[in-house]
Amino acid sequence: MALPRILTTAASRATGAGGVVLKRLQNVRIPGTGGPPVQDDRDTAVSRWRVVTVLGSPDQVGTGDDLPAPLATFRDRIEIRVTPAPGDKGTELAARFRGQASEDDIGELRSALRRAKQVIEVGEVLRVDPVPHGKRPSTPQGELLEEAAEEAPKGGVL
């Protein structure tokens, strides 16, 4: 086996192992840091408010017919709460489901809140894909990054 192939294989395995370790560490909470010690049960997770802080006044956010487009797809399924953010730091836009929702629905709502924030603040949803200079290289690291970027909007990470 040639040295470049050995190095590529080693890098691929190290990247995969690192991804497994990071995935496990995402749910580890250090006592006293403010995060929940365990994940919520399904009913609690569905009824929890998801919140983003928007740089702007409450009248810029809208709650009725003028709801931002990313949230309008959930119109009848969610409750919306708009309140001034603490310390005059803008407006808090919160949403939660009225009834039952799946894990995918919760992820989609989180993503919709972030997109709504961008629409209100910038006027459009900012895009990172595809990268400005083209497609990421087809390497193990590039594939891992593509996968993480695809899942990030639903999980609130990256």
Image (cartoon, grey):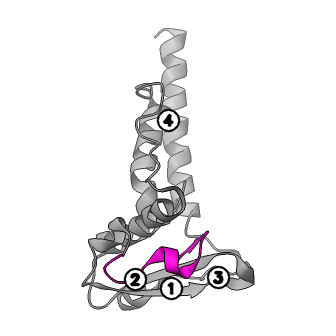
Q: CA distance from mark 1 to mark 2?
A: 7 Å
Q: Which residue is mark 4?
A: 13
Q: Nearer the viewer, residue 136 or 119?
A: 119
Q: Which residue is mark 2?
A: 63
Residue 78 appears in which quarter of the rendering?
bottom left
Q: CA distance from mark 4 to mark 3?
A: 45 Å
Which range is magenta?
52-66
Label 3 near label 2: C-beta < 8 Å?
A: no
Tag 3 or tag 2, which sits nearer the N-term? 2
Residue 85 shows which numbered tag?
Answer: 3
Q: CA distance from mark 1 to mark 3?
A: 9 Å
| Secondary structure type for disc 3 | loop
Residue 82 shows which numbered tag?
Answer: 1
| Secondary structure type for disc 1 | strand
Residue 85 appears in which quarter of the rendering?
bottom right
User: Residue 74: horizontal and vertical position, in percent?
Assistant: 28, 76
Question: Taking 78 as reference, is 141 above or below it?
Answer: above
Q: CA distance from mark 2 to mark 3?
A: 16 Å
Label 4 near label 2: C-beta < 8 Å?
A: no
Which residue: 43% across, 53% down?
A: 125
Residue 39 appears in the picture as rendered: no
Q: CA distance from mark 2 to mark 4?
A: 48 Å
User: Residue 13: horizontal and vertical position, in percent?
Assistant: 49, 35
| Secondary structure type for disc 4 | helix
Tag 4 or tag 2, which sits nearer the N-term? 4
Which residue: 50% across, 22% down?
A: 8
Q: Amino acid at mark 3?
A: Ala
